[in-house]
Each structure stands twice: as structure tokens, then as C-alpha cells.
Image (cartoon, grey):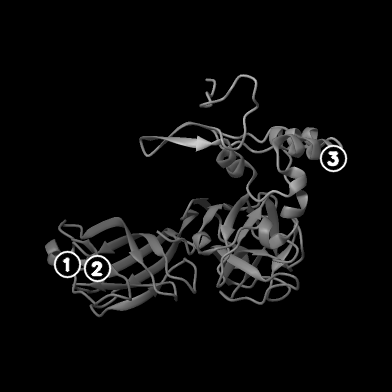
Amino acid sequence: MAVTIDNLNSTVLPSRDHVFPAMKDGITVKLSVGQILDFVIGDAPVDMDTLGKLADAIMTVSDALADVDSDLANKASLNGVETLTNKTLNKAILSSPSISSPTGEFLRGTLFGLTMANNAADVANDIDISVGFAGSDGAVPSLMTLPSSITKRMDAPWALGSNNGGWLDGSSMPNGTGHFFLIRGSDTGVVDVAASASLNPTLPNGFDQKRRIGSIPRSSGAMKTFVQLGDYFDLVMPSPDVVELNPGTSAGLKTISVPVGIKVMARIAVGMRAGNGLQDNTGEVIVSSPDVGDYQPLFNNAFSHALLIQNSAEGKNAAPIDVFTNTLAQVRRRVAASAAGTAFYINTRGWVDNRGRLF
């Protein structure tokens, strides 16, 4: 819409004193040409105090407008989803490891992928780890990403790369528990996997960040064979860990085939045979975490702990249960009555390990 300037003769060019109507806070006011020019020019130097002079100055720079147009065309759009097709990110911005790997408290407990499995070529010694990422467990968590699956050998000392050794504590992993860590060098960005009997291992030179991604027991010179789904680790063959005859009625701690050094939710199957002269409800047994109170094996306690009630003439019963362990891979068992022929069994099916994730 054209702007009409008041009191302007058709033969006279507009001056700074001419005015035209404008709106301010809903009220019509008169705004002078001088005021408008002051708004546009502001404190511009004399050689750029008009739009014409400013345009002339811009054009003295070689290809200035073409450069501005090109930069605007290559900017990332804030409208909708930006695919960044034909867009260029400044490589220098991403060259620093502290920038290319995000850091911050929001990464605490982050873990995705990094699923573990026995390697088919050497089930007893080698572990495969799938791609994934995790937040380190340091004071300031940093994102660590494993871009390709990797295989680490527990029968050889740690060395960088897939199909190389993975044990940090010596030449090979002994019987016991191996804690597996995703490790990263903050200066180089290099990521690998290593295992140790310690939850606070000494990392290889050049590595200063870590995160435990799982813990696997080893016995009789071989890693336990397992399958993993998220935090669930199931043994391929349940381990018959406890066989007790006439166990008595006192509470006892029993070691099972789950990792040592951490607390897990053990997934076990418990069996009970009442024994000679014991029938009906005398074959009760309760299995509980060592970290909670020692409950008597009574029906009223069934709501908080595992309770098997024997009520058949043969005096036999069994059930799968889940129960927390202590850091020594132990659970507590207590039976109501015991005699010659009484037998108590625990078969370990696997365990649940949250691996330091925050819920």
C-alpha cells in the first residue's frame, strides 16, 4: 500500500520534516520522514547513512550478495524435520573429543544395546558384544559408542581390537566372575571392551572412561553359557547348585551360579522332599534375600518371600522363584521340618542385572 505524505507539493521532493500517519498503541500519530530515517540508519557512519550508500558499499565486496545467498540456502531449517541434505557442518566443530562425545548428568545410567553372548567358535573363552552405547560412570558421564560388534577372548590378556584378548588382570580369566566394561579414551575417542574380576579395574593406557555392561561367571575353566535379553541373563543349562539331605531347620546361606560382587535378582527353581514321617504342611520352606529378615517358613510369610507348602502324601514340591542375592551370590533358605530323607534343592536358571541403569 502506498504511503501518503501530508502537505507535499507535487513538484517538491520530500524532506525530513514531512510527516505521514502511523499507529502507536491504537492511536493515530504523525511520523516524520526524519524519524523514519533515524530508525533505519541509527548510528551508521556518514558514508553509509542512506540505503543507497549502504547498497553501494555492499556491492564493492566481491560476490558479497552471492555469498550471503549461498549461506542462507545452506542453513539448517528450523521448520519441520531437517534432513541436512546438502548441508555442511563445520568439521572443526566436531574435531574435539569433548564435543563429539556429549557429556553431562543426563547421560547417567544410559545404556543401549551392547548385548553379550558366547562366541560360537570358542564358547568356553570368547564373548561377543553387539553394537550400542552407554554413559560412562565417572563424575561427569560421557557418551561411549561401540560402532561395530566386537569379540574379546578371556583366555588372553587385554589387547585393543576385536578377536584380541580381553582380560585385564593377567594372562587369562580364572574361575570366578568376570565384570565386562565398555571403555573409552576421552582424548582419542577410541572405544573397546575389557573384563576384570574387579568392579574398579585399572584401565589400559589411554583409556580413562568405563561402564559395566554385564558380569558372567566362569567355572571348571569355561564361561557359563547364557543368552541375554536386556537385563535378563538366562543360563542355557540350569545349574544344580544346591543339593542338601536332612538340612535341618536353621537358616543357612547357599551360594548359587550368579555373578559375585554385585547384587542381582536370582531366577531359581527350588525343590523340597519332606522326608520320613513328614507329611501334610511340614515340608514348608522359605527362600529369601540375605539382606532382609530371617522369616520362619509359615503361610503368613508367603506374600513377601518364596514359600513352598508340602501337602501331598509323597512329600514332594517344587517351584520357580525370583529372589535378590547378596554380593557373595548367596540366598538364604530355611525349612520348617527336617528328618532322614528330607532333601532340599536349588537349580539356578539365571539372573536379572540392571547394570547400573537408572529407573
> Considering only vertical position in the picture, is 4 above or below 277?
above
Which element is circle 3 on?
loop
> Considering only vertical position in the picture, is 329 above or below 88?
below
- Image quarter of the C terminus: bottom left
Q: Which amino acid type corresponds to the residue marked 3 in the rendered image? A: Val
* Residue at numbered disc 2: 286
* Residue at numbered disc 3: 61
Lower sequence index among marks 2 and 3: 3
* Residue at numbered disc 1: 301
Which element is circle 1 on?
helix
The x and y percentages for residue 257 are 47, 66
The x and y percentages for residue 308 are 22, 61
**Image quarter for residue 24?**
top left
Q: Residue at x 25, y 73 (%)?
A: 334
Camera-side mark, 1 or 2:
1
Q: Residue at x 56, y 69 (%)?
A: 140
Pick whichever, 241 or 144, lies toward us. 144
Residues under numbered marks 1 and 2 in contact, where contact means CB atoms less than 8 Å apart: yes
